[in-house]
Image: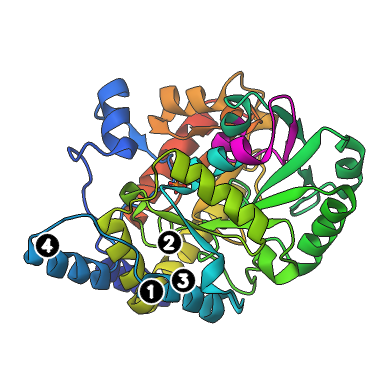
């Protein structure tokens, strides 16, 4: 490893404060260790092993010292922070009136599926994709229509030809992951424009889940779907992934279309879900107004982890097929060529590494790796996986 690289890792790990998360009731470590044993390294669910930004912690301390935690509303500053974040980070102008509140991006997706479609209606998703997209449709008794991503030479692409073929009069909604979890594609303006033109032609509403929008590796640039169009577009987001605060269960939507916004707001009022969580609100304001410097360091570090894994897999596990993610702290490993019955189980049993099972994303031959951990942990994960891989004797 070059000295410069080593410096970067040291500097970033210092700033990011990588800490032991065990015995905090965290899903990533404790639920897996309780089930499979202390020797397993969890590398799955999408949160990070880093302390959140110091500015957020400072804001929490200040709020805690106040000592009163009564019912709290989201102030003008809260909505302004979101407007400014989209403008500054994503070069996207939004109006604060378009913003709606939510208790998490996933609950918002479920509420929107419920509100905007009827039982039996069809909703399009693009597997392999984030498992709750499937669940939100199925659990609400709507029908999933898959427009699977196409694996091209070095990338994954949306299949526009197939998309037109699968739409019929029952198809009402499409949910996209922008950027795409798990393959790490950062959709370009041209791709989103082409997608939107098809949606417009058939009268589909698009939900663009932009929760991974802030973790983008140069030279890629994030494009909000709102830059392409506003009609029939719903954007969902939160600082959960970016600032490692998903446990605060706070999120927002951006819905320029007044009619759709009213539908959504009525739905959350009906469910009495309008009250915000004080720490979720405090975190968003601090993150979006003071968290940028920390975020820059985070992206540098994640990029070096991404490059390390990519090079390691290419060199040491060449039968595992992967592309270089353009964004997100997730990496998608296609293990088809290993001809394993269940790659996730294989690496759990033989490497004692717990990865996400690709089957949950709609592809049983793949696994998803979370790289938002210390370099030391990541190296252990890779070395263990290599030993398990080598034991297959490249059959
Ligand atoms: C694409 C995507 N959407 C939403 C979420 C979760 O959102 P929330 O925790 O706000 O429900 C995740 C978490 O991994 C995700 O990857």
* First-in-chain label (2 vs 1): 1
* Separation of marks 3 and 4 at Cα, in angstroms: 23 Å
* Separation of marks 2 and 3 at Cα, in angstroms: 14 Å
Give the residue number, with chain letter if any, for mark 4: 64
Camera-side residue: 253 or 243? 253
> Looking at the rendering, which quadrant does residue 145 occupy?
top right
* Separation of marks 4 and 2 at Cα, in angstroms: 23 Å
Local secondary structure at mark 3: helix
Q: Marks 4 and 2: CB-CB under 8 Å?
A: no
In the drawing, what numbered circle is on residue 82? 3
Give the residue number, with chain letter if any, for mark 2: 242
Closest to the camera, between mark 4 and mark 2, is 4
In the drawing, what numbered circle is on residue 76? 1
Local secondary structure at mark 2: loop
* First-in-chain label (1 vs 4): 4
Residue 38: x, y in percent?
24, 29
């Amino acid at each position: 490893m070059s000295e410069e690289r080593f410096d970067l890792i040291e500097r970033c790990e210092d700033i990011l404060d990588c800490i032991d998360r065990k015995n905090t009731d965290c899903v990533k470590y404790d639920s897996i260790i309780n089930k499979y044993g202390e020797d397993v390294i969890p590398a799955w669910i999408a949160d990070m092993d880093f302390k959140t930004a110091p500015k957020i912690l400072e804001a929490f301390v200040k709020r805690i010292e106040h000592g009163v935690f009564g019912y709290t509303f989201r102030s003008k500053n809260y909505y302004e922070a979101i407007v400014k974040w989209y403008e500054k980070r994503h070069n996207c102008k939004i109006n604060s009136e378009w913003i709606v509140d939510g208790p998490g991006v996933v609950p918002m997706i479920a509420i929107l599926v419920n509100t905007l479609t009827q039982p039996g209606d069809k909703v399009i998703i693009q597997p392999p994709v984030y498992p709750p997209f499937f669940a939100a449709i199925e659990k609400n008794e709507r029908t999933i229509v898959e427009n699977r991503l196409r694996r091209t030479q070095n990338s994954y692409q949306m299949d526009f030809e197939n998309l037109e073929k699968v739409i019929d009069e029952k198809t009402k909604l499409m949910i996209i992951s922008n950027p795409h979890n798990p393959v790490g594609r950062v959709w370009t303006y041209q791709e989103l424009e082409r997608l939107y033109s098809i949606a417009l032609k058939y009268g589909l509403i698009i939900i663009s889940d932009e929760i991974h929008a802030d973790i983008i590796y140069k030279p890629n640039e994030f494009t909000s779907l709102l830059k392409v169009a506003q009609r029939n577009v719903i954007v969902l987001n939160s600082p959960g992934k970016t600032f490692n605060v998903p446990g605060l269960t706070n999120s927002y939507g951006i819905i320029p279309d007044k009619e759709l916004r009213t539908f959504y707001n009525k739905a959350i009022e009906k469910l009495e879900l309008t009250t915000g969580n004080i720490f979720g609100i405090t975190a968003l304001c601090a993150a979006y107004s003071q968290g940028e410097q920390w975020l820059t360091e985070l992206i540098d570090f994640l990029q070096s982890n991404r490059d390390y894994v990519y090079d390691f897999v290419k060199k040491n596990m060449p039968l595992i097929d992967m592309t270089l993610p353009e964004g997100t702290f997730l990496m998608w490993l296609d293990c088809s060529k290993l001809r394993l019955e269940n790659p996730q189980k294989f690496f759990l049993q033989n490497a004692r590494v717990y990865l996400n099972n690709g089957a949950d994303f709609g592809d049983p031959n793949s696994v998803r790796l979370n790289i938002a951990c210390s370099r030391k942990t990541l190296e252990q994960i890779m070395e263990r996986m290599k030993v398990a891989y080598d034991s297959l004797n490249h059959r």
